[in-house]
Amino acid sequence: MTGAGKFYDELETRDAATREREQMQALQQQIAHARENSEYFGQLLADVDPASITSREALATLPVTRKSDLIETQRNTPPLGGLNGLGMAQIANIFMSPGPIFEPGDIQGDYFRMGRAMWAAGFRPGDLVYNTFAYHMTPAGHMMESGARAVGCTVFPAGIGNTEMQLEAISTLKPRAYVGTPSFLRILLEKGREAGLDMSSIKVASVGGEALPPSLRTALQDLGVDTVIQSYGTADLGLVAYETDAMEGMTIDEGVIVEIVRPGTGDPVAPGEVGEVVVTTLNRTYPLIRFATGDMSALMEGESACGRTGPRIKGWMGRADQTAKVKGMFVHPGQVVSVQKRHSEIHKVRLVVTSEDNVDQMTLQCEVETGTADLQAAIEDSIQAQCKVRGSVAFVPVGSLANDGMVIEDARTYE
């Protein structure tokens, strides 16, 4: 644990020129490492002289690697597509996200760098952290646990599901800190109140995996949580950015370099202009260079009032492609098509994602000649199996869905 006082470490308050110089030096080392140790980047950057990448303008000349391409890349060169910068004998874990996409991990230290976000949320040494992210297959639970332990916290690995048991655990253990999606925190607090159980110990929350609209943040505060801070990260990159008490966008993590580019290209856009988030990580295990996340955001000008001097983004502003994050899990168009292929009765599909009272909902609209209860149940089982998230089914007449190429429609609004 390196935190002391308001800031996690001295990196957060470096002057801009020092940060840029030190990150460019680290970037040159990372490119050299990736060329020498990663099969994928060895080929992609074969003609690049690491010493020539001395600025963001030079970085912007390098090719982009897209998250949407990882499925095929890893299928062709299992298990990690040759993107790993360390040999398999040096990698502690391999996780799986929907797609499937596989990510390497480590159990040593704060591999995913989540401790910085938790410190900003008010987590402190000695706190008991109630971690409701999944530990099974996906890295989310491990990401948050390693961050909490880096701060000096004790972690209760609650995971997902078993709500009644979770309520009992919270009322008995009285954790001060919560980690998980904001919607599940609300469910726990409301159900605990209905059951007459004491949930009041939870005072700080580091949330992620889904949007946190102002109405949901206010609802959680009304339920007794003093501080609700969201972070933005991915299974591939770890922490990318995090809120602070200034509530002015999200401060970019010190372990990554973030660009905002015009979707479908690698061309940076001006500060304030919305574009796709492209991240270069300084992680030597998985040295992702110019990794296009598919997420949309915009760079903010100036420094945060919190005193941290790093650059900021406005936060998550939607997807550049049709991939949607539902209840903390990515759902890809290919998964939706896989559901359709399981049932010959379906002519065409469209997955509509909505939010009801700040809880994500998925409805698969299916063009069928005749819809039956048995077919509906079978399709719902296929949704769960393929997308790893539950969804409902709505039968619609053949030919009624728009001919616009859309497989996933994200109809959520965040007010």
Image (cartoon, grey):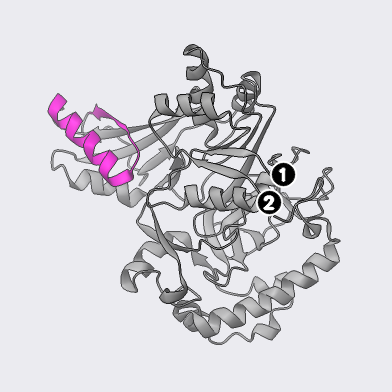
Q: Residue at x 70, y 74 (%)?
A: 26
Q: Secondary structure at mark 2?
A: helix
The reply to whether dot 1 and dot 2 touch (C-beta < 8 Å) is yes
Whole-angstrom CA distance, mark 1 to mark 2, is: 6 Å
Q: Which mark is residue 120?
A: 1
Amino acid type at image mark 2 = Arg
Vertical arrangement, residue 69 with respect to residue 61, above or below: above
Using the rendered image of the protein, determine whether residue 314 is visible from the camera's viewpoint.
no
Q: Residue at x 86, y 61 (%)?
A: 15
Q: Residue at x 49, y 76 (%)?
A: 86
User: Which picture quadrant has residue 372?
Assistant: top left
Horizontal side of residue 344 vs 381, given as left or right: left
Q: Position of residue 385 (x, y in %)?
A: 26, 43
* Residue 102 covered by magenta stretch: no
Q: Which residues are magenta?
A: 373-396
Q: Position of residue 222 (x, y in %)?
A: 65, 18
* Residue 394 covered by magenta stretch: yes
- Tell which of 28 and 273 is nearer to you: 28
- Tell which of 85 and 47 is nearer to you: 85
Amino acid type at image mark 1 = Ala
Instruction: Please name the residue that numbered disc 2 is placed on.
Output: 116
Vertical arrangement, residue 144 with respect to residue 354, above or below: below
- Tell which of 412 and 120 is nearer to you: 120
Q: Magenta: predominant secondary structure element?
A: helix
- The quadrant the N terminus occupies is bottom right
Q: Check disc 2: other Cα within 10 Å, few if <14, some if 14-19, many if 20+.
A: many
Vertical arrangement, residue 17 with respect to residue 136, above or below: below
Horizontal side of residue 75 vs 265, given as left or right: left
Q: Secondary structure at mark 1?
A: helix
Q: Residue at x 38, y 30 (%)?
A: 162
